[in-house]
Image: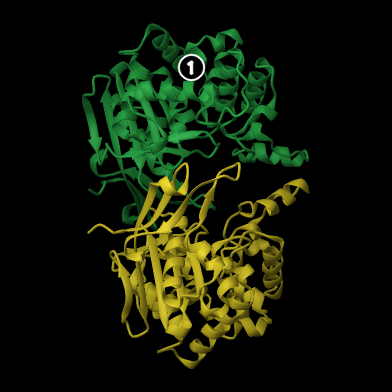
Chain colours: A yellow, B green
Amino acid sequence: MTDPVLVEVTRGACLLQARVESFHIGAAVAIDASGAIAFQAGDIDRPIYPRSAVKALQQLPLVESGAADKLGLTDDEIALACSSHSGQEVHVAAAASMLRKAGRDEHTLECGVHWPNDQASARKLIAEGAQPSAIHNNCSGKHSGFICLACARGEDPAGYVQPDHPTMRQVTAALSAMTGAKLDDSNRGTDGCSIPTFAIPLRALALGFARFGSAQGLSPERAKATRRIREAVAKNPLMVAGTGRFDTRMMTAMGARVFCKGGAEGVHCAAIPELGLGIAVKCDDGAGRGADVATAALIDRFLRPNNEEVAALVRPVLNNWNGIQVGEMRPAGPLL
Amino acid sequence: MTDPVLVEVTRGACLLQARVESFHIGAAVAIDASGAIAFQAGDIDRPIYPRSAVKALQQLPLVESGAADKLGLTDDEIALACSSHSGQEVHVAAAASMLRKAGRDEHTLECGVHWPNDQASARKLIAEGAQPSAIHNNCSGKHSGFICLACARGEDPAGYVQPDHPTMRQVTAALSAMTGAKLDDSNRGTDGCSIPTFAIPLRALALGFARFGSAQGLSPERAKATRRIREAVAKNPLMVAGTGRFDTRMMTAMGARVFCKGGAEGVHCAAIPELGLGIAVKCDDGAGRGADVATAALIDRFLRPNNEEVAALVRPVLNNWNGIQVGEMRPAGPLL
């Protein structure tokens, strides 16, 4: 079964004669907590690695265990724990604060080092003659959350990225409970930041986010944790991604009406609490640009917000180095 | 008609249990100058924008008109004229030299400004407190070639990126003659660097590179120009891309036995002179990583070089931020 075209990328001397230059095939689903499907396209039962799209589910133990409150984590820190951040100063400061509250510093992070993804932030570091550390890694907030969870519970965080570390076991158990998917060695891969990532069907991922957004079927502690995380992110959309990026732009525009989070290799998950819907998208080719447009199109389809920023995310304009519009991206096929 | 899967991207806790995380569909063709097909997959008659993959064909007028010799362009400068370079010092110096020989400087460039794609070079600029100019644009070598062509012929280069400028008319005429494709407003788009890019079927692009590599059916002047360009690039593979990049690595490994050049949105063209073959690849999703692996697989299929570097390009290892191997890319379907 071949997945349908979800997104097209056009180019032309003018928009009227633009032709499709590239396109993204993939699968997408929107579902409620009872499993009723509101939208589906492509193979939604093939397991895919969700990568960073499930960070909010992975932080449920941090909040519901009481660890976040015990360490006095603030809303912006909880939002950062769910982030793939750009390494801007505000992100680095929040990660440092989380680690401090855990009695640790960036040397406890096991995510690896890369330069800030935000170019202005990288340039500032370079101009200062500084080098990046693991705290600039886009996953440092998530890792700081895991370290906070371990330390608040009196566990040694060393090796927390390993599948059988007590902290990672709790994280994996929460992800499994939310999605209903069995997570074990047979569907395990290693993520870019070295934690396990488990292949899960899109349908189960969307179900997990339907539960995350609606709290249906969850224990009181878990339901409370989902609300706390969603509210923390809605108040701090900059913390979850970065300036100009999709998740920050979408949640700045939509507030608490939408939770969304992208992952590497063309994955996006979202929740629309007022409709009880969870959404999961995978571009088969791994393109984040395609998953972004498909996610925006689904959010727009269900909420019809008539919002300029959302419209710009549904149909992004492509400009060249001279600022000339050379094309655009647009939803296609089942997303029309 | 759906194009087949050409390349797979895998991930797993170990290679043995890796699963396909993402995949790239596309079309590819290898053909000789008579039009005989040696390999084909997918729809090879759908016009696609070749983008930067045809730069070598676009520089034929510079060489065959005598402009390159009149201005005393060196082999490394001719190689740079065919490049999408990384903005390393060696690239910037060669572009500056070309512009000087034309009696111009970077202010004549109409390609737009971006930071060097090579991160170490970008960091050096930043550390010096410098800003990038158009000369750091990956297309500045190609644009310098166009300016050299205009100036050597006594034409005003201003507006050389426009389709109806005398210089661009010569460039477009050469591309049309080599590929046999009609290039006009109906299939014209605007490239990232503002010059026209014309949608051309893959079959015609591959034919153009079969002619480029074999000189079959070309006038003596054009045949001589193809040899000059191929030799210049083979001697200076670093000039055509940059440290660690596909075209530089492939031509460093294979020398004059292969000419190859990638373009944006998943396009790659190549010539194998000893077999008289031209190759053209398009990943439908626009992924350069996919086009790279598909091109390497075709070169490996036809030449069987038993070369470690080529093998590494056919099947690249994917490591995460901690240097742990998390997966690989590999040819698939018709490329097996």
Asked whether the viewer can see residue A232, the reply is: yes
Q: Position of residue B25 (x, y in %)?
A: 31, 47
Q: Which residue is mark 1?
A: B61
**Of the residues shown, which amino acid type is indicated by label 1?**
Pro
Q: Residues within 10 Å of mark 1 (few under 14, many from 20)?
A: many
Which residue is depicted at the point 43% across and 83% down? A275
- Where's residue A242, x and y in %? 62, 62
Residue A303, horizontal then vertical, whole percent = 46, 77
Q: Nearer the viewer, residue A307 or A256?
A: A307
Instruction: Name which residue lies at 29% across and 59% down.
Output: A4
Q: Residue at x 36, y 65 (%)?
A: A335
SS category of the residue bearing label 1 = helix
**Most foreground residue, B220 or A226:** B220
Q: Is residue B283 above or below residue B134?
A: below
The quadrant holding residue B86 is: top right
- Left or right: where B183 falls relative to A151: left
